[in-house]
Image: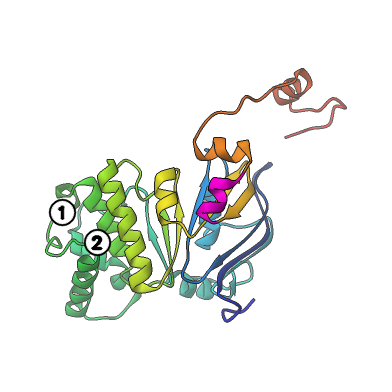
């Protein structure tokens, strides 16, 4: 794959990942297009976080391939991966602001670490990004002086300070009241439209997903159940997908042989299952 290939900025093929003997991702195939908002959903243990780390070029795969902006992450050198990560922005779930630094210092941190810009230029760039996320004038405050929604906005400002090609958002509306969560959704849409970036959002908030997504990927137990538009997801007849999206438990039947094999780590023929 090359970066010029048809509007695809992330290409994942037959991605398999293990943590020790445990398989986490089971042959994932996924394309993420330039300029779209892709929402990744799934229950606890579905593999969302592992998939996100792969898309950030932070995880080692077992087999398969992942290309990000044309770069094969499995064969890339350390320098190539460092260059690639400068084109990626991340808004972490809890904001991940450093409590000992002002908001402005937090926003400028990627510039301090990765550029040779003079301090005045960095301050101007930080103020511009704070304007974008509706936090103009808050650069001298400490994170402890911000509300939950303001911390999320500051995290977005830091994530976009270097004008990334792809922005990743991990549970951006988690822990927020409905009105503030809706405002964060509006911000995500505005960032995509104003800055033209691709945005990947991992969330369990169905209302948020339906509001912002161009397409939704539904994961379950390390496999992709479905990829499609909001309307396609709404119309999908699968009860399994409906249960996952609405966070309803499934009535799983556990058979005696299966239960015994889980306890002993062996199948009925005495072969190890772990």
Q: For residue 230: magenta?
A: yes
| Colour pattern | rainbow
> Residue extending furthest right?
269
How far separated are the C-alphas under marks 2 and 1? Answer: 9 Å
Q: Which residue is drawn at 36% across and 51% down?
A: 172
222 sits left or right of 147 in the view: right
- Please say if 109 is above or below 52: below
Q: What element carries label 2?
A: helix
70 sits left or right of 194 in the view: right
Label 2 neighbour load within 10 Å: few <14, some 14-19, many 20+: many
Asked if residue 205 shows in the view, the reply is no
Asked if residue 19 shows in the view, the reply is yes
| Front in this rendered view, residue 100 or 25 | 25
| Residue behind mark 2 | 106
Q: Is mark 1 on a helix, strand or loop?
A: loop
| Sequence-wise first label, 2 or 1 | 2
Q: Which residue is drawn at 36% across and 62% down?
A: 189
Q: Residue at x 60, y 28 (%)?
A: 250
Q: Residue 157 carries which label?
A: none
The magenta region covers 229-236
Q: Position of residue 140 (x, y in %)?
A: 12, 61
Considering the image in quadrants, where does the C terminus appear?
top right
199 sits left or right of 175 in the view: right
Q: Where is residue 106 in the image (x, y as percent from the top left)?
A: 24, 61
Indicate the quadrant where residue 28 lies.
bottom right
| Residue behind mark 1 | 142
């Amino acid at each position: 794959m090359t970066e010029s290939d048809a509007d695809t900025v992330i290409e994942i093929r037959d991605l398999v990942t293990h943590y020790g003997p445990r398989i986490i991702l089971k042959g994932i195939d996924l394309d993420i297009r330039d300029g779209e908002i892709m929402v990744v959903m799934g229950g606890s243990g579905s593999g969302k976080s592992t998939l996100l780390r792969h898309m950030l070029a932070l995880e080692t795969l077992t087999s398969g391939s992942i290309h990000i902006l044309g770069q094969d992450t499995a064969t890339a050198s350390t320098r190539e991966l460092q260059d690639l990560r400068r084109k990626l922005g991340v808004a972490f779930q809890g904001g991940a602001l450093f409590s000992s630094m002002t908001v402005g210092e937090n926003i400028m941190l990627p510039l301090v670490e990765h550029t040779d810009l003079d301090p005045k230029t960095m301050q101007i760039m930080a103020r511009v990004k704070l304007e974008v996320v509706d936090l103009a004038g808050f650069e001298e405050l400490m994170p402890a002086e911000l509300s939950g929604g303001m911390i999320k906005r500051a995290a977005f400002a830091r994530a976009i300070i270097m004008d990334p090609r792809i922005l990743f958002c991990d549970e951006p509306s988690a822990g927020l009241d409905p009105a503030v969560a809706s405002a964060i959704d509006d911000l995500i849409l505005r960032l995509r439209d104003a800055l033209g970036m691709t945005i990947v959002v991992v969330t369990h908030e169905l209302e948020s997903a339906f509001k912002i997504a161009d397409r939704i990927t539904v994961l379950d137990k390390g496999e992709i159940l479905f990829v499609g538009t909001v309307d396609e997801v709404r119309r999908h007849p699968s009860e399994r997908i409906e249960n996952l999206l609405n966070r309803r438990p499934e009535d799983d039947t556990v058979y005696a042989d299966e239960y015994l094999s889980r306890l002993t780590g062996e199948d009925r023929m005495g072969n190890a299952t772990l």
